[in-house]
Image (cartoon, rainbow, N blue to C red):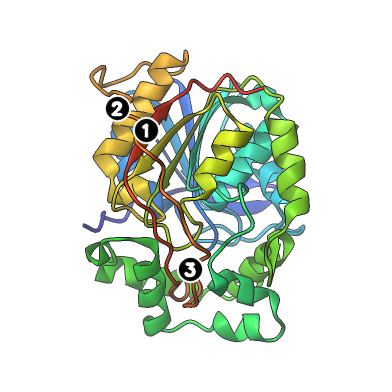
Amino acid sequence: MSAPAPRRRHVTVDGRRICHRVDGDGPPVLLLHGISRTLRDFTELHEQLAERFRVHSVDLPGYGGSLPMAGPHTLPGLAGFVGRYLDAVGVHEPAHLVGNSLGGAIAMRLAVTEPARVASLALVNPAGFGREVTVALRLLALRPLGRLLLRPSRWAARRAELSLFHDPAFATAERVAHALEVARQPYAARVMLETARNLGTFRGVRPQWREELLAELERLDIPTMIVWGDRDLILPAAHLEAARARLPRARTHLFRDCGHMPQIECAEEFHRLLVDFWSTTGGPTATDPAAGAGTDPAAGTGADPGAGAVPGVGGAGGTDADGGEDRSRMAEAG
């Protein structure tokens, strides 16, 4: 269940070396990973989409093979980086953004600051729709505990990988080894603490940036799909209901028996949903016309996640949700 290491390139953005991957031809697609993660979280999806699209995966600044930014690693700073990355790789037409976790929040921020750059949004268990987040991330706000929690170890790396998936078989030795390698980079803890403390406190995700972002996003006319795993231990699946309330015309889907990364744990189903979403909203041509929206059973709920290790460095506690769901409300957001 581990994907092989992707073929990577490097590009210079703001004078800093950035690791990325580019494959395929067609409409531009950009894949954005979460906090403390890397572009490897999109390896399988990248390769599937590259059969029809020009697909870009990028290590965000300070993660994987990318050097940190000179400025602060805040949500506006990271969204600004994404815009400059698109310039650096010659993407001047609107791109279809796919963002997981923090990557989803970054995609939303770019959409509200530079809407002409964004053709559509596919948000995968995104940050921004609720206060609740695993206590492991909330603890990073406490000094000096946060720095201590980010000390790399193989045990912590394995706990982190286990926290991301409902099926522990996805927490492979290769994924654990890669997480440990990323955590050992000299700037990794500083970048993660900077971002985590900008977005949240010990009480949870800060409401100020969430409310501002969603108020601006709901006024835009950008096709949007939001999906969640019903067993997400990082951001509870109950946030999907909040997303529906704020963006009622967005297409939504709840994956059964799936954790924080549906693009890995439910790879084939996620790929079908994505290309169907694009094909029915005027986006890139769908590769699978049989992909459907499905039924609309009751949504799952999620409790505030319990204690555990830091995602990307340690583990996480649990939420719970019942059932799987797919609501096909087209995202003519605004």
Query: What residue is disc 3 on?
Result: 311
Which mark is in front, 3 or 1? 1
- Please tell me which of labels 3 and 2 falls first in the chain: 2
For mark 1, give the secondary structure.
Answer: strand
Marks 3/2: CA distance? 32 Å
In the image, is 156 to the left or to the right of 62? left
**Which quadrant of the figure has residue 163?**
bottom left
Contact between marks 2 and 1 (CB within 8 A): the answer is yes
Look at the picture and state if 104 lies above or below 193.
Answer: above
Count of marks, rendered view = 3
> Residue 285's spot in the image, x, y percent?
37, 16
User: Mark 1 and mark 3 in contact (Cβ < 8 Å)?
Assistant: no
Q: Which residue is mark 2?
A: 294
Dot 1 corresponds to which residue? 326
Q: Does 264 sit above or below residue 283?
A: below
Q: Secondary structure at mark 2?
A: loop
Nearer to the camera, 322 or 208: 322
Q: Give, as a three-letter code, the residue at label 3.
A: Pro
In which quarter of the view is residue 72 placed? Answer: bottom right
